[in-house]
Image (cartoon, helix red, strand yellow):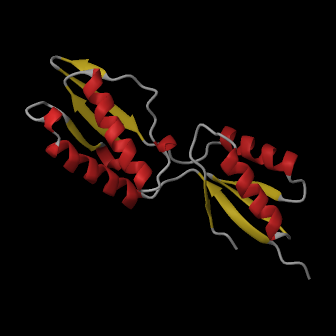
Amino acid sequence: MAKDFSFDIVSDFDPAEMANAVDQAQRELGTRYDFKGTAAKLEFGEGKTSVEIEGASRNQLDAILDMLQSKLIKRGVSLKVLDTSKDPDQGGKEMRWSVPFVKGLDQDKAKQITKLIRDEFPKAKSQIQGDSVRVSSTSKDDLQGVMSLLRAKDFDFPVEFENYR
């Protein structure tokens, strides 16, 4: 009897790693000389679904974001988690930038992934399950090939693998 092996493809991040990266960036922000005496601030948004960045200029906001991104890279979190498409808001002397976190696969992204898997690995079965995609096959080699194909493909959203059985 042939046993099916499977794994799930999700677009998610580890909230503990995100909290640690934000905490480290906040500590570095407090010790850096170029931010002394300024309104520079970094904190989680409401419900920890975004990060709020405040600063005196766009250059300061970019420097704080760069600092956060370096902490995320060191912790193994994809930078595609941060949605920087929205521009900062100018309010008086300071600027605010709300950077939301990208989480979950919507229907279009899931279809894009399943089509790619169907084209490259016809023996692997992929099915959309809510905000994840389950890939199953009788061969572990096919599943590992699917994983390396998705890692090599440059999506505009983070891709992670869970429940490898």
| Residue 124 horizontal/vertical position (percent) | 84, 59
> Looking at the image, which residue is at 60% across and 50% down?
159
Does residue 113 sit above or below 61 in this rendering?
below
Work out which residue is located at the far bottom of the displayed protein and give it.
Answer: 1
Q: Position of residue 117 (x, y in %)?
A: 80, 50
Q: Image point 34% across, 36% down: which residue?
A: 65
Which quadrant of the view contains residue 46?
A: top left
145 sits to left or right of 91: right
* Residue 97 seen: no
**Residue 136, above or below 117:** below
Quadrant showing the N terminus = bottom right
* Of the pair 69 and 52, the residue shown nearer to us: 69
Q: Which residue is most to the left?
A: 37
Instruction: Answer with left or right where residue 126 lies relative to residue 37.
Output: right
Considering only vertical position in the picture, is 4 above or below 81? below
Q: Residue at 48%, 43% (x, y): give it.
A: 79
User: Going by the picture, which residue comes out furthest to the front?
Assistant: 33
Q: Left or right of 39: which side holds 79?
A: right
Asked whether the viewer can see residue 154, the reply is yes
**Residue at the spot x=66%, y=61% of the render?**
8
Of the 4 image quadrants, the one containing the C terminus is bottom right
The location of residue 104, given as percent across then percent down, is 55, 48
Report the number of discs.
0
* Residue closest to the eye, 152 or 105: 152
Q: Residue 55 at x, y = what percent?
A: 21, 28
Residue 31 horizontal side relative to residue 6, left or right: left
In the rendered image of this protein, does residue 156 appear above or below residue 164?
above
Q: Quadrant of residue 5?
A: bottom right
